[in-house]
Image: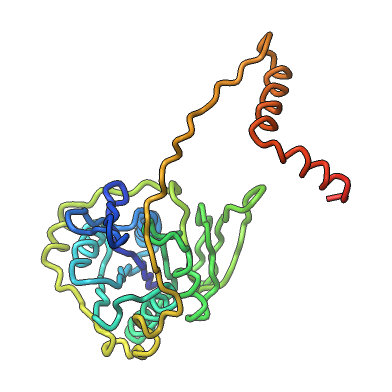
C-alpha cells in the first residue's frame, strides 16, 4: 500500500506581521512550520503504516527552504519525501497548486501506485480548503473531507470506512480505494519522532523535482495557471467600541433578556421598523 501525504510549509501564524506599506506578509524573521492541519493527516497515515505496513511518501511544493518540513515529517516516521520546487511554480493559486501536486503524485504512481492521498483540512495561511479536493478531482479519486476517524481499512476488498463530521451529526461512509482524505484537527495525537528516524531524516537524500521532472504544463502552473490573485493582505482594525454592561432589576433571565432587547433596539433605531416590515411581508 502506498500513501502520499501532501504538506505545506507555512509561517508561524502566531508571529505573522504585515508590512505597513506593501500590505504583504513579512516572512523575514518569522519561523516556518508544517501547516498544523497537515500534521493530523500525517499522523493518521503513519498509524495506517503501523497497522498494515504501508509506504508513506510526503510531498510538498515550495521553495528550497521547505526541505526542513520534509525532514521533520521523515523524523516522525515517513518513508520518502519529495520537494516540488521550481521558479515556474511561484505565484500558484489553489488551482495551479493542485495541478502541480497532482502531476507529482502521478509521477510517484508510475513507480508505485498510490492508494491513499492525505491532505490537511486547510492551511493557516490560505484557509481555502481547496487543494485537497482539487487533487482528488484531477486524480479521479473519491474525496472524504472533514474525517474524524478511520473505522476500517480492507486492503483485500480495497475499501475504507470512515466517520465524517457533518451538520447535526456524524456520517459513516464507505468507499473504494484509491481516495483522498482530509482529517479534522484534534482527531489524533501527533507522535514524537524516534531517534533512529531522526538520524535517518538528517541523512536522507531528498528528492527534488522541477516542473520538467513531473511533466507539468507551464501554462497550468505559477501565475500563468492561476486565475485568482491575492491583491492585498491587511490586518483588520480593532474595534474601539467598548462592551456595555446590561443590568436589570431583580437579575432574572426574563428581565435581563428584556433589557438586552431594549438596548439592541436603542442602539439600532431602524431595526424595529425593518423587522415589522419583514413580518408584514411574510418574510
In the figure, is residue 272 to the left or right of 175?
A: right
Name the colour scheme. rainbow
In the figure, is residue 167 to the left or right of 240?
A: right
Residue sitting at 41 percent across and 41 percent down? 238
Vertical order, 2 against 46 (above or below): below
Q: Quadrant of residue 220?
A: bottom left
Judged from this view, the residue extending furthest toward the top is: 250
Percent of width and height locating residue 222 = 34, 81
Viewer-closest of 263 and 97: 263
Judged from this view, the residue extending furthest toward the front is: 269
Viewer-closest of 11 and 214: 11
Residue sitting at 37 percent across and 77 percent down? 101
Viewer-closest of 137 and 239: 239
Viewer-closest of 224 and 197: 224
Percent of width and height locating residue 178 = 49, 75
Residue sitting at 51 percent across and 66 percent down? 154
Percent of width and height locating residue 211 = 28, 86
Q: Does the image show residue 51?
A: no
Q: Quadrant of residue 76?
A: bottom left
Vertical order, 165 against 157 (above or below): above
Q: How many marks?
A: 0
Percent of width and height locating residue 72 = 22, 58
Q: Does the image show residue 139?
A: yes
The quarter of the picture where the N terminus appears is bottom left
Amino acid at each position: 500500500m502506498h500513501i502520499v501525504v501532501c504538506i505545506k510549509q507555512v509561517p508561524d501564524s502566531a508571529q505573522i506581521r504585515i508590512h505597513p506599506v506593501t500590505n504583504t506578509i513579512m516572512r523575514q524573521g518569522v519561523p516556518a512550520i508544517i501547516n498544523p492541519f497537515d500534521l493530523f493527516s500525517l499522523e493518521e497515515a503513519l498509524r495506517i503504516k503501523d497497522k498494515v505496513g504501508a509506504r508513506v511518501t510526503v510531498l510538498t511544493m515550495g521553495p528550497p527552504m521547505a526541505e526542513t518540513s520534509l525532514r521533520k515529517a521523515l523524523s516522525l516516521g515517513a518513508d520518502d519525501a519529495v520537494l516540488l520546487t521550481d521558479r515556474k511554480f511561484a505565484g500558484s493559486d489553489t488551482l495551479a497548486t493542485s495541478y502541480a501536486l497532482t502531476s507529482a503524485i502521478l509521477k510517484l504512481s508510475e513507480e508505485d501506485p498510490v492508494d491513499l492521498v492525505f491532505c490537511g483540512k486547510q492551511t493557516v495561511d490560505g484557509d481555502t480548503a481547496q487543494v485537497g479536493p482539487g487533487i482528488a478531482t484531477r486524480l479521479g479519486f473519491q474525496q472524504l473531507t472533514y474525517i474524524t476517524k478511520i473505522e476500517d481499512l480492507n486492503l483485500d476488498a480495497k475499501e475504507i470506512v470512515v466517520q465524517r463530521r457533518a451538520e447535526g451529526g456524524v456520517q459513516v461512509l464507505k468507499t473504494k480505494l484509491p481516495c483522498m482524505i482530509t482529517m479534522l484537527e484534534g482527531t489524533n495525537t501527533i507522535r514524537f519522532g524516534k531517534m533512529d528516524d531522526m538520524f535517518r531524516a538528517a541523512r536522507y537524500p531528498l528528492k527534488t523535482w522541477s516542473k520538467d521532472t513531473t511533466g507539468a504544463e507551464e501554462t497550468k502552473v505559477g501565475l500563468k495557471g492561476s486565475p485568482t490573485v491575492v491583491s492585498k493582505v491587511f490586518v483588520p482594525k480593532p474595534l474601539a467600541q467598548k462592551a456595555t454592561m446590561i443590568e436589570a432589576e431583580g437579575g432574572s433571565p426574563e428581565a435581563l433578556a428584556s433589557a438586552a432587547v431594549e438596548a439592541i433596539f436603542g442602539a439600532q433605531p431602524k431595526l424595529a421598523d425593518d423587522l415589522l416590515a419583514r413580518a408584514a411581508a411574510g418574510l
